[in-house]
């Protein structure tokens, strides 16, 4: 680890000014669960490190006019412990509840998880499933975009659209109506804690009063560079009565899509194309249970 200058600003404005001033070779740290490892392994060699932990203005969970707003410095533990998130947004509750270990959940932040855009990021997979928006700020101003758009860009790290002097300050999404909408997440990993996801599957499904699916969104992490969408599976469900049998009809489609996307990696493709189906069987059962449509015995 080479020496670097260290700053701990007290406000977002001060942080953005420092980031702009040192944008040629700067790194920001919140929980440090990623950057500390990168520094120790010499994968990152910034000249300046800016610690964001004093920015309490970015640590919040709010529900305003039907929109959930979560500050970037909110920890995974705080999200998992929030009663409204647990009740209304099960996909995010379950994802944050299963991140790493208790120590990592108490240090790691949702903003760091999204900004790192890790292949196996559980919070990232859950937020993409929710079709979330992110807010980015710099000295040049503020911009807001869909998380999908954020991931499609090529910024300073080439993981997402984030510029070197730009800070992700908030993630937001519509508050699900739990009378008609269920959200679910299931993580497959090699052990229960301190494990990177092998596959993390998330789903949002909405039905009408007759149990007919009017909206479906499915994403799976750790199958590609970013959470994998399954648009053909979603289209198969919309307009049909949501049952376990109908949901199982999407699995062959999912199997073939994962096989095609990962065929250049023969050491993992055969495991993943089968495992993704097991993950989504768990997700389907949870969705149906939440909606009160069907109890699936597995």
Image: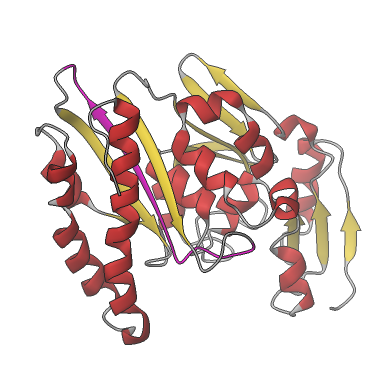
Percent from the top left, x then y, of residue 149? 40, 48
Relative horizontal placement of residue 29, taking residue 241 as reference (left or right)? right
Q: Is residue 134 left or right of residue 106?
A: left
Vertical side of 93 occupied by 109: above or below: below
Please report the residue visible at 61 percent of the width from the left and 45 percent of the height from the top. 110
Position of residue 197 in the picture relative to residue 163 (left or right): left
As displayed, is residue 190 above or below residue 185? below
Foreground of the two, 138 or 173: 173
Q: Is residue 28 above or below residue 256?
A: above
Quarter holding residue 32: bottom right
**Does residue 216 show up magenta in the picture?**
no
| Residue sticking out furthest to the top | 65
Is residue 2 placed above or below 21 in the rendered structure? below
> Residue, x 11% and y 31% (percent of image)?
241
Image point (81%, 60%), residue name: 49
Q: Nearer the viewer, residue 193 or 224?
A: 193
What's drawn in magenta, residue-wise?
A: 194-209
Tell me if 16 is positioned left or right of 138 in this view: right
Residue 82 on image: x %, y %: 62, 29
* Residue drawn at 19 percent across, 45 percent down: 234
Residue 279, by quadrant, is: bottom left
Residue 186 locus on image (x, y percent): 42, 50
Tell whether position 205 is magenta.
yes
Q: Position of residue 33 (x, y in %)?
A: 72, 60
Split into 4 quadrants, where in the image is the N terminus? bottom right
Q: Residue furthest front?
A: 297
């Amino acid at each position: 680890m080479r020496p670097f200058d260290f700053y701990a600003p007290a406000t977002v404005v001060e942080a953005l000014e420092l980031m702009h001033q040192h944008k040629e070779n700067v790194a920001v740290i919140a929980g440090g669960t990623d950057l500390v490892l990168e520094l120790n392994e010499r994968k990152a060699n910034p000249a300046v490190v800016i610690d964001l932990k004093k920015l309490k203005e970015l640590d919040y969970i709010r529900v305003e006019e039907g929109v959930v707003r979560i500050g970037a410095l909110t920890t995974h533990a705080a999200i998992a412990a929030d009663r409204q998130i647990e009740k209304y947004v099960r996909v995010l509750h379950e994802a944050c509840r299963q991140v790493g270990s208790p120590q990592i959940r108490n240090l790691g932040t949702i903003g760091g998880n999204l900004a790192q855009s890790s292949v196996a990021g559980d919070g990232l997979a859950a937020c993409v499933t929710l079709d979330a928006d992110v807010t980015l700020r710099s000295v040049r101003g503020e911009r807001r975009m869909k998380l999908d758009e954020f991931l499609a860009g090529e910024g300073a790290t080439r993981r997402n659209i984030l510029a070197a002097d730009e800070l992700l300050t908030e993630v937001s999404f519509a508050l699900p109506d739990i009378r008609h909408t269920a959200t679910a997440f299931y993580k497959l990993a090699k052990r229960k804690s301190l494990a990177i996801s092998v596959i993390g599957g998330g789903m949002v499904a909405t039905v009408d009063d007759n149990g007919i699916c009017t909206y479906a969104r499915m994403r799976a992490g750790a199958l590609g560079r970013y959470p994998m969408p399954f648009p053909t599976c979603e289209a198969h469900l919309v307009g049909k009565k949501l049952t376990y049998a109908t949901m199982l009809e999407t699995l062959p489609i999912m199997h073939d899509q994962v096989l095609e996307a990962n065929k250049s990696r023969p050491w993992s493709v055969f495991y993943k194309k089968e495992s993704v189906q097991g993950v989504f069987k768990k997700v389907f059962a949870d969705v149906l249970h939440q909606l009160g449509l069907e109890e699936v015995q597995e």
